Amino acid sequence: MTRPLLGIVCCIREFEGETIHRVIDRYVRAPARWSDADVVLVPALGTLADTRNLAARLDGVLLTGSTSNLESWRYGGDGGGGDGPHDPQRDETALALARAAIDAGKPVFGICRGFQELNVVFGGTLQHLPPRAQAMHHAPAGVSTDAMFAHHHPVRPVADGVIARALGAAPMTVNSVHYQAIATLASGLTAQAYAPDGLVEAFSARIDRSQVLAVQWHPEWDAEHNPQSRWFFTALGDAMRA
């Protein structure tokens, strides 16, 4: 069997006066190594992309984290700009490709923003964390990238859930770099881990042949030396080969 082909959706950024489609390197290297997959980047072309055609050619999809947030109107909000920055082309592409891949029976995994995107795909809602909750879930503003990803808190795996069966039911320490979070978990998704304040931090689903798994933390950051983080990508690889 050839190595599976994993699609990773890009974000839109401005660079040297031009619009670029980009994915941070660590999101590409972690699945290339620990999922044993070949990786292709999916540009955020929105409605210019035929996502059903893409889904048919891919063996799986990974929705990554990003500094942008989903536009609130996509999950029933008032569309106000207070929860930005936004990336509407990423929203359009990621949500459509995730739906198409699930319909095609392909695995779709999510990290941070991707976790939030998948909750919206299934009909759930999001919230922008109030200041009192942000201290647990994000480092103070102005720190270095290393310090930001060193910010952590425990999560409690759900007994006999996907994570507990793979890694054990004891609390895990995870990094935490997010201002948005789940408000209402979508019907059809099963919570797999909770933060101490009760926020859902991981969920899964099985829709016919499609496996869905998403986490609010960033396993790509420390997969090289953290077996718990590495497991996320080996599970992705197994799902694509299943």
Image (cartoon, grey):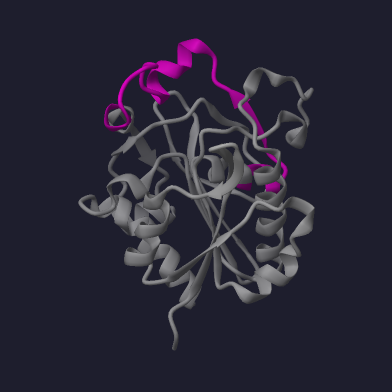
Where in the figure is residue 211, as x and y percent of width and height?
55, 64
Residue 238: say if magenta.
Answer: no
Residue at 50% from the left image edge and 30% from the top image edge: 199
Label count reads: 0
Identity of the residue drawn at 37% across and 16% down: 140
Quarter of the image holding residue 182? top right
Q: Position of residue 78 (x, y in %)?
A: 79, 22
**Residue at 66%, 65% in the rendered image:** 101
The reply to whether the magenta stretch includes residue 132 is yes
Q: Tell whether 160 sits left or right of 58.
A: left
For residue 182, above or below residue 23: above
Say which quadrant the N terminus sits in. Answer: bottom left
Instruction: Give the side of residue 166 with respect to residue 215, left or right.
Output: left
Q: Nearer the viewer, residue 183 or 51?
A: 51
Tell which of 61 and 27 is nearer to you. Answer: 27
Coordinates of residue 12 in the picture (x, y in percent): 61, 43
Tell me if residue 59 can be seen. yes
Residue most extreme to the top: 132
Residue 221, given in percent of the width and then of the height, sits at 32, 45
Q: Is residue 160 visible?
A: no
Is 122 left, or right, of 67 in this rendering? right
Q: Most extreme residue toward the left, as rendered?
A: 225
Point out the stretch of residues depicted in magenta. Answer: 118-147
Q: Residue at x 38, y 21 (%)?
A: 136
Query: Which quadrant holds residue 73?
Result: top right
